[in-house]
Image (tube, rainbow, N blue to C red):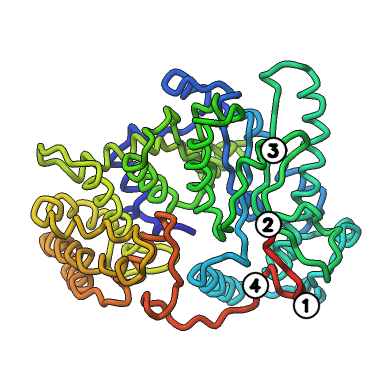
Amino acid sequence: MGLKSGNGGAKAYLAELIPQAFRTYPTLLDARLALADTTGADRAGTVAVVDGNVLMMQLPTVVVMPIADVVRIVWSSIEQAVGAARLVVVVFDEPAAMTLAKKAEQTRRDANRAARKVVTSVDLDDETPLNDFDPATLDAQPCVLKYRDHRPTRSRFYDEVCRRVMAIFNEKAAKWNASGKAANKSTLVFDGVDLAGATRPPDEARRVGIVGSVDSDDVVAALQRETPIGEGDIKIQYLDRRVRELAQTDENFQPVKLIISCTIDTDSLLIGTLGVARRRMEPPPPVGIASVLAMRTPATKAQKQIDEHTAATFLVVDIVLLEAHMQAHIWKTGVQPTNEQMLNAMIATAASAALAGCDFVELGGARFDHFFDAMNSFVRTEPLSLDQFARALKPDPVVAQQITHPLLRICYNASTSMEAKPRYKRQAKSVYECDRATLLRAAWTAAYWCEVEHVADAEWGFPVFELATSDDVAGNPASSSTP
C-alpha cells in the first residue's frame, strides 16, 4: 500500500535526505515522551489516530488463530496507543463510500494474492465463508483469518472484533476514569464500523458511523461529518485538520498539543505534507499543534536471528519539519516563496510522487528521487507553470485536469536530469514521453490526497472499471452507510 518503495522511493529517499525529521522509538509512549520538550504535550494533550485496516492486516499468518487471539492482539495495539494518548481514534475504510480507483486497485490486489496462494488440503476442505456468521460461529472456529481475507466478509468481521475490543476498553476505562485522576481519563472512538458486530441480523442494513466508548458522546458528536470518507488514509488527514479546528472552540480538544497518526501507508507522507502546506492558506492561523506520523516497523529477519524476542519499533516522522525541509530543498534559490507558491510546489511534488508509483498510477522508469531533485529547476525556470498547480484544489474536474500541462513540464525537467545519469537514458525517454492518461491519473491522485475527490472515470484516464460487489453489500443487499 502507498508509494513505491525501494532506494528511489519517497520514504527511503526522504529519510536519507532529511534525517532530522525521522526518529525511531520502541513504543508510542516513548515517542510522545521524547517529543514532550518540543510539543509540550502530555497524555491529556495527545490524540492518536490509528489505521484500523493496518491493525487487522498485520495479524500473524498462522494455521490456528481463534477470535480470542485476534481480539487480544488488536486490543494490545490499541492499549499501547491508549497509554500514549487520552483520545484514540481508530479509522477503517468504508467500502460503500470508496472511490472507484481504490476499489479497482483492491480487486487487482485480491486477484494477485489469489494467484500466488498455495492451495493446501486445509483449503480444499474449507468452504468459502459466508457473510451471515454470528459471534458463536466465530467462537467455534479454530482459525478465523478466512473471514478477514475474504473481502465480502471482512467488514462484518472487523465490526465484531471492534465490538469485543470496545467491551474490553469500557470495562478497563470504568476503573481508570473512576480513579478521579485526570491523567487516567481515556476515550476510544471507532470511525467506520457498526458496533452491532456479528450480532446484526444478516438481512439488516450495516449502519456505519463514528462510535465511541462510554461517556464519549460529546467527543463523538464533535467528530461527526455529513459526507462519508471511503479510505482510512484520507480519514487520518481529515481528523488531523478537524482536531485543529475543534481545539480552538471545544473544551474537550483545547488541551491538544500533539496528534500521532499511526499507519504504514507511505502515501501518508505526501498527504501529511500537503496538509501542512494547505494550513498556511487557511484562516484562522494554525493552532500550535504538532503532527507526527508513526509507522510501525517489524523487526527484520536478521534482528530476529540475533534475538528472537526483538520487538517492532516505530519510525516517527515530524510532518511539519519534513515539509519545511522539503520546501527548503525545492526552493534553494535564496528567494522566499509565498505561501501559495509553497502549496503549489507541494501539490507538484505529490503529483510527481504519484507518477513514480502509487496505488493508482505508475509511470515506467520514473523514480521519486529523480523527480524531487528536478523540482528546483522547475520552480526556478517555470514559475507560471507552477502557478497552475493551484487548480488541483478546484472541484470542477475540467479545471483540475489542467495541471497535467505543468506536470508534463516537470517530466521534461526530470527527463533532462536523468539523461545525465549513467544507465538512465531509456527511463529518461519513458518519462519524457509520459502519456496523457497517466498524467491525468497522477493529477487525480494529487487532488484526492488534498481531499478533493473526483469520479475516477475515463475522463481522468482510468479504465472502465468492472468491480466485484462491495464487501459492505455482498451477501447483504440492505447494506447502508447511514450512521
Which structural element holds mark 4? loop
Do labels 4 and 3 touch, CB within 8 Å? no
127 or 184: which is nearer to us? 184
Q: CA distance from mark 1 to mark 2?
A: 18 Å
The disc, 3 or 2, on the residue closer to the chain's N-terminal end is 2
Q: Which residue is mark 1?
A: 124
Do labels 1 and 2 touch, CB within 8 Å? no
- Give the image location of residue 379, x and y in percent: 15, 52
* Circle 4 Cα neighbour tier, 10 Å, few/some/many (<14 / 14–19 / ≥20): some
Residue 30 appears in view: no
Residue at (87%, 62%) from the top-left corner? 134
Q: Which residue is mark 3?
A: 188
- Give the image location of residue 41, x and y in percent: 51, 22
Which three-letter amino acid code belongs to the residue tagged 4?
Answer: Ser
The disc, 4 or 3, on the residue closer to the chain's N-terminal end is 3
Q: Which residue is mark 2?
A: 61
- Give the number of the disc on residue 196: none
Q: Which residue is mark 4?
A: 470
Do labels 3 and 2 touch, CB within 8 Å? no
The disc, 2 or 4, on the residue closer to the chain's N-terminal end is 2
Q: Given this view, does label 3 or label 1 mark the residue nearer the observer?
A: 3
Q: Would you say 106 lies left or right of 183 here?
A: left
The disc, 1 or 4, on the residue closer to the chain's N-terminal end is 1
Q: Would you say 22 lies left or right of 294 here?
A: left
Do labels 1 and 4 touch, CB within 8 Å? no
Quadrant of the snapshot with the C terminus: bottom right
Residue at (61%, 74%) from the top-left corner? 114
Q: Would you say 237 lies left or right of 8 here?
A: right
